Image (tube, rainbow, N blue to C red):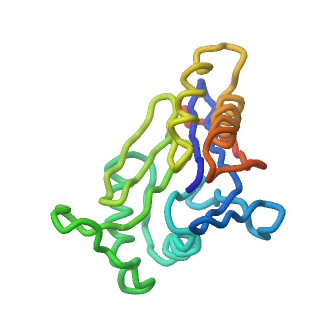
Amino acid sequence: MTTVVVVKKGDQIAIAADSQSTFGDTRLGAGDDACWNKIFAAHDGYFSIAGSAAHDLVLQAALKKVKNLDFSDRPAIFESFRKLHPKLKDDFFLKVDEEEDDPYESSQMTVLMANPYGIFAVYSLREVYEYQRFWGIGSGRDYAIGAMNAVYDNPDFSAADIARIGIEAGCAFDVSSSMPMTSYTLEKNK
């Protein structure tokens, strides 16, 4: 339950996230949460997760434990998450069951990342997508994607501006997302 977005425009890449955590019918806003930033830096980029709040600390710890991880393109990201999966199971006790007919074990998380190589998402079966313009994850993603699509081609808006607009839309319409937001911007490799 969140809204997280990534945007690539020109040489700029931005990632942004709302600050609300939701536990069933209970919401925990930034005013009460001492650690409300949903984005963390690792491997020369930024990561954010939709799903269980436990994934945040687990993924941060796993990224530090596994050596030789590469997040430079789709095949490298896939291989890195393939290396992470056994660690998630063995060291962090990940429950891998989702649907009985799933073709692979699930990592149970959706990860959005921004790094100098681009904007990417990794889904629960380790599907890796690279996006050309923008994308969003979490319960507010549809609102965010719609808002970002409406303004993306406006030359007055930077990647950071578009990401902000996406988060604001997610927070305006999704009951599981709220302001304030966190945003980071970096330069794309040329």
* Residue at screen point 70% across, 21% down: 157
* Residue at screen point 59% across, 27% down: 148
144 displayed left or right of 66: right
Quadrant location, the C terminus: top right
Tell me where residue 40 appears, x and y as whole percent: 64, 60
- Asked if 95 appears above or below 188 in the picture, the reply is below
Taking depth in this image into account, of 188 and 22 the one nearest to the observer is: 22
Q: Residue furthest front?
A: 25
* Residue at screen point 65% across, 29% down: 162
Tell me where residue 61 appears, x and y as whole percent: 55, 76
Taking depth in this image into account, of 48 and 42 the one nearest to the observer is: 48
Tell me where residue 22 appears, x and y as whole percent: 62, 63
- Asked if 93 appears above or below 135 in the picture, the reply is below
- Asked if 150 appears above or below 70 in the picture, the reply is above
59 displayed left or right of 169: left
110 displayed left or right of 172: left
Q: For residue 66, which quarter of the picture?
A: bottom left
Q: How many marks?
A: 0
Q: For residue 168, which quarter of the picture?
A: top right
* Residue at screen point 69% across, 25% down: 158
Quadrant location, the N terminus: bottom right
